[in-house]
Image (cartoon, helix red, strand yellow):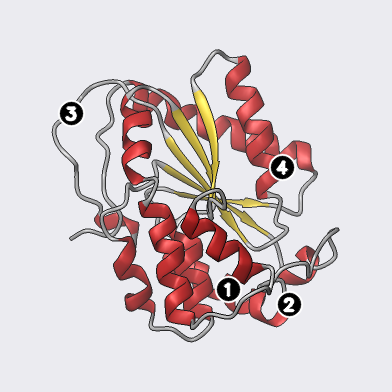
Amino acid sequence: MENGDNCTPLGANNNSRGALVVFEGLDRSGKTSQCGRLLSYLEGLGHSVELWRFPDRTTSVGQMISSYLTNKSQLDDHTIHLLFSANRWEKRSMMETKLKAGTTLIVDRYSYSGVAFSSAKGLDFEWCKAPEVGLLAPDLVVYLDIPPEKAAERGGYGGERYEQLEFQRKVAQHYMLLKDSSSWEIVDACQALEDVEKQVKEMVLQHVRTCRKGKTLSYMWSS
């Protein structure tokens, strides 16, 4: 597969570190709820952990993205894709520093969202991946799987630019082109919230332990 399987090591660093856990899925799939519950759970176990979200709307680039997403501005599809990528690059150095210091990062959306959403708009798939090469690769991607029709029934749907049913169907198809067997776990997001939470806790703890033993950091989509 042409995906995160081809990550390359940053170096032979066997030091204990935090885990990079990314949540992906369609809009209204439950990512924000599960991220918050996981944060509380890991904090309760005494882990150093932070919750990040992309886009990070607090930065100057993030404010431009926010204006676009709330339909207050118009941008070319290529331009907004590069802004989303730049928003992740703004945090790349800090992300590495935090992980190496032992902090686990729970990230609500990452490079996969950027590629899935932009390619669903018709942009070339490989072109969409290119600006993400060199960002840190997640240790675990939790994909919350929900039919677009079910997501559309959830509260608040339609409030932002991309929350349109037909478009979300395309996004779901493009996500499946990005999944890989080494880091992705697909969870049925139609289950009760507590059942999803239980599954997520178990798989995340396993990866946190592995990273504490010295798993090497790696890059996104590098050959």
Under circle 2, the secondary element is helix
Disc assigned to residue 171 = 1
Residue marked by disc 2:
165
Quarter where residue 64 is shown:
bottom right
Above or below — where is 78 with respect to 94? below
Residue located at (55% from left, 48% from top): 58
Q: Amino acid at mark 3?
A: Asn
Quadrant containing the N terminus in the rendered view:
bottom left
Q: CA distance from mark 4 to mark 1?
A: 21 Å
Q: Amino acid at mark 4?
A: Ser
Precedes in sequence: disc 1 or disc 2: 2
User: Which element is circle 4 on?
Assistant: helix
For residue 13, the mark is 3
Q: CA distance from mark 3 to mark 1?
A: 36 Å
Q: Is residue 2 visible?
A: no
Place of residue 163 in the rendered image (x, y in percent of width and height, measured from the top left): 71, 71
